[in-house]
Structures are given as C-alpha cells and as structure tokens.
Image (spheres, rainbow, N blue to C red):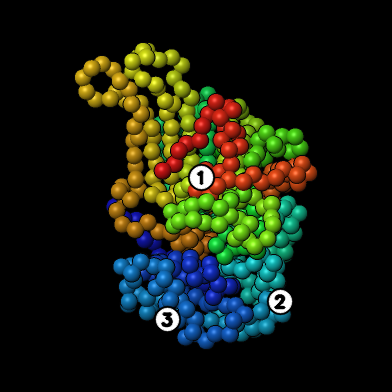
Amino acid sequence: MTSQIIPVDPFDFIIFGGTGDLSERKLIPALYYRQRDHQFSEPTRIIGTSRSKLSDDEFRTFARQAVSDHVKASDVDQKELDTFLARLSYVSTDATTGAGFDDLAKAIGESHCIRAFYLAVSPTLFGDISDQLNKHKLVSPNSRIVVEKPIGRDLDSAHELNDLIGSNFDESQIFRIDHYLGKETVQNLMALRFANALYEPLWNSANIDHVQITVAETVGLEDRFTYYDRAGALRDMVQNHMLQLLCLVAMEAPSSMEADAVRDEKLKVLKALTRINGNEAPKHTVRGQYRAGASAGGPVKGYIEELGKDSDTETFVAIKAEIANWRWAGVPFYLRTGKRLAARVSEIVIEFKPIPHSIFGEGAGPIFANQLVIRLQPNEGVKQYIMIKDPGPGGMRLKQIPLDMSFAQSFQGRAPDAYERLIMDVVRGNQTLFMRRDEVEAAWAWIDPIQHAWESARQEAQGYTSGTWGPSASIALIERDGRTWHESN
C-alpha cells in the first residue's frame, strides 16, 4: 500500500539560513522528495538566503551536494533532481541591517503565490527578520512564517519573542514547528485513540496504571556546544517534544481535526499539569550529566571533556508528572530523555492495570500487565503486549507476547520524513501539527518552576556512564512507586 500524493498549490519557499545545517540535512532533502513525488504545482520556487555571498549556481551546487549526502542514492532520480535544482535561486540578506531585502523583494516579485518564510536561523534573528519582511512589504495575506525551537528560554522570553513575531504576522500565519509531531507514529497515536472502539473506553485512570515517555539519544554534543550548554535537556527536549507527546496521549477527544480544536485540547492538558516546585523537585525530578564511557562506536568522552570547561548543565532529565483532571487523577506520567544513553529510541508506553486475580495458579507463571508500546523511532510501529498460553503439552503455562504492527512491513515503500509532511502542511495552511502561542507559553509556565527549583536548591546533575540508561536516581524515581522502566531494545 502506498500513500496518495495530493499536489499543493504553487508556492514560494524562502529559507533564511539557506546554507545552514538544518537546510542541508533536512529542508532541501525534504523538498527534493516532494519534487520527486510530483507534489509541486507550477510555478513553485525555492529561494535560499543568508549572509553568505553566493550565486544561484553556487547555491544549486550546495543543494545538489545536500541531496547527495542526505538522500539515499536509490531515491535520486536525475531528471527530477534537475527539475528541482532549476527551481532554486539565491539572495544574500542581512537581517540586522536590512541589506539585501530589496533584492529579495525583487526576486519574489509580484507573485500572488503562497509565500512560506522558513526561519532556519538563531531565534535572536526571528524579530529582525519578521520586521524586515514587513518593512519591505513582503508580508501578504498568503504569507506564512515558520519558526524552529527554541521559542525562548523561559516564559518571559517566549512571550517577548511571540510578541516580536506577532507584531508582523497574524497568529494564523505563524507555524511553530516541532518535527516530532510530523512523525507518522505520533499522528497514528490519535488514530489509535479516536478511530478505534477498542482503546478509548479504556483510556483513563480506571484502566491505565501509568504512562512512560522516553526520548533517548546515543550521541553527545555533536556541533551544538554553545546552544546546548545554555539550554540543557529540560529546555531542549522536555519543554517541547516531550510535553507535546504527553498532550497527545492525555488530551480529550477534540470536536474535529481542525487545528484549533486539537490545540484547545492540548492546552487543557498543559494547564492541568501539577506544578513541580520547591521541595517537590528533588522527589519528582532527576538531573544527570554523562561521563566518559562507551557507545557502539567505541570509547567516548564525558560531557565536560567534550565541552572543554566545567559545567553543571544537565544532559539527562527524568520527571514524574501528574495531571490534575478526572481522566488522569492518580496516573503518573514518567518522562525521561538524555544523551549518550544505551540506545537511540523514542517511544510511549501505556501500561494497563494488572488483572485483579489470577485463576491459573503458580505453575502458570507470572501474569504481566498489558502494555501498548508506540515506537516513534527507530523502526516505527505499535506493539500490544498480551498474555497467552504457551503452546505445548504439560499444563497451562502463560507467556507475554506482542501483537506487532511494523509500519515498514504493513505499509510498503518509503516512509516520508517528518519535515516533508510539515512543510506541505505549511503550504496548505494547516496548523494542526504546529504549536499555538498559548501552548508554548503554557509549557514554559510548567517548566520554569522546575528550573527555578533546581537553581534554588542547587540540585546538581548526577553523573552517569555513557552507554547506560542514566543516573541510578532515575531508576529509583520509578521503582519506589513499585514500577520499572520499559526496557527498550
């Protein structure tokens, strides 16, 4: 089975930071794939812009190399690549001085196509760029602006940044992107809940014991030294990716799939999260920082050695969160994320309550609680763990097995990258998978007290060996409640 490709209206896609890392690794490859699958209508154009002085041909050479480096060789169709590169042009601009924006306006011209301005740059430039676009009359009713995280580093700065962008663009034109929401499995979470009679009646505190959300990486700092040491795992991962996943698990059924209907329900979850502050932080949170150890590629340095200076920035966070509403009262949500962990995996585990009484006797073996495991990456899929009889003679012996739906096996063909889906949603003007301003600020309103509590109590980041599952305190966090982390493999 292959997905149906529906062409979008013609558009101009302008990439600020067009020669940067995000453009090279994600945006240009994503746009190429949409070209290859014939999703563009004419006359679609892609314009790169940054402070670098490049000609159109030099930018096309950059894009060709990006496709070569980040697209499977078997997916490269030379004819489609040539057509794609012909759509590209380049304009040098400087957002702080306004230099080059007249040239950008000339390049766009009087086109009435959809205009998507993608800000693949530092958030410090968001306000300047939106001001320059407005000043040079590039903001039309058909314009959209796409901004990457981080949207601020706390509630006050997020509010200020939203004000800056909002002074030039209407909220309906602002697309705050979280690429996790573009993953097929994340979207399938909503399908599982709201398109099946099986799960939704059980999706509450009467039947669910707890929820685990894990986003684990095996890599270290890579090339994000400056940003990451200022942010840390709480701001970098929990405030956006993990809270968005939590919202999709915990939200009530929206009235429809319209953007605001979905985002209204997510906002209710964020507002219902019990605040963690003061004396609660040491009991409900764990901070960690990786030390030297080993990964699949061999020995690796610790965070401080990679950074080259002393730092107490956390590279690991575990949190026991609670939602104060009728559906989820008494159901803990355990969140954990970190770098240099034992495996690269992102998954959501819904653990149901155990059966109240076993009729099978001790000889049948232990009866494990049912689990629904939703794997976001790698190997996207869904597993429902159930108990069955182990085949064979000799009495009743029970065994836990997964009913396994692998996306790769169930849906033949290539699975589009999250950026491909999200870019096309920007062009369509569909904001369902993008964060609204009040969502972002509500998330910061929950995160800030945790950060402040850590700073006030001087809650140090506990060391953990690279290649493990984090500090021992994170194991204690869940095991003192009589539960255990799901072992990912």
Q: Depth check: 126 or 191 in front?
A: 126
Could you tell me if the residues under marks 2 and 3 are in contact, i.e. CB atoms within 8 Å?
no
**Residue mark closest to the camera, 1 vs 2:** 1
Q: Is residue 149 visible?
A: no
Considering only vertical position in the picture, is 121 above or below 404?
Answer: below
**Residue mark closest to the camera, 1 vs 3:** 1
Q: Amino acid at mark 2?
A: Thr
Q: Depth check: 118 or 407 in front?
A: 407
Question: Residue 366 sits in which quadrant?
Answer: top left
Residue at 46% over, 76% down? 63
Q: Which residue position is annotated with label 2?
A: 96
**Residue mark closest to the camera, 2 vs 3:** 2
Circle number at residue 86: 3
The Cα atoms of the two marked residues, 1 and 2, are separated by 44 Å
| Disc 3 packing (10 Å; few <14; some 14–19; many ≥20) | some
Q: Depth check: 52 or 451 in front?
A: 451
Residue at 51% over, 45% down? 468
Q: Which residue position is annotated with label 1?
A: 468
Q: Is residue 364 left or right of residue 275?
A: left
Considering only vertical position in the picture, is 256 above or below 117?
Answer: above
Q: Amino acid at mark 1?
A: Thr
Considering only vertical position in the picture, is 221 above or below 29?
Answer: above
- Under circle 2, the secondary element is loop
Q: Is residue 378 visible?
A: yes
Q: Earlier in the sequence, mark 1 or mark 2?
A: 2
- Under circle 3, the secondary element is helix
Residue 178: image x %, image y %?
55, 55
| Disc 2 packing (10 Å; few <14; some 14–19; many ≥20) | few
Residue 284: image x %, image y %?
66, 35
Q: Depth check: 389 or 416 in front?
A: 389
Q: Earlier in the sequence, mark 1 or mark 3?
A: 3
The Cα atoms of the two marked residues, 1 and 3, are separated by 48 Å
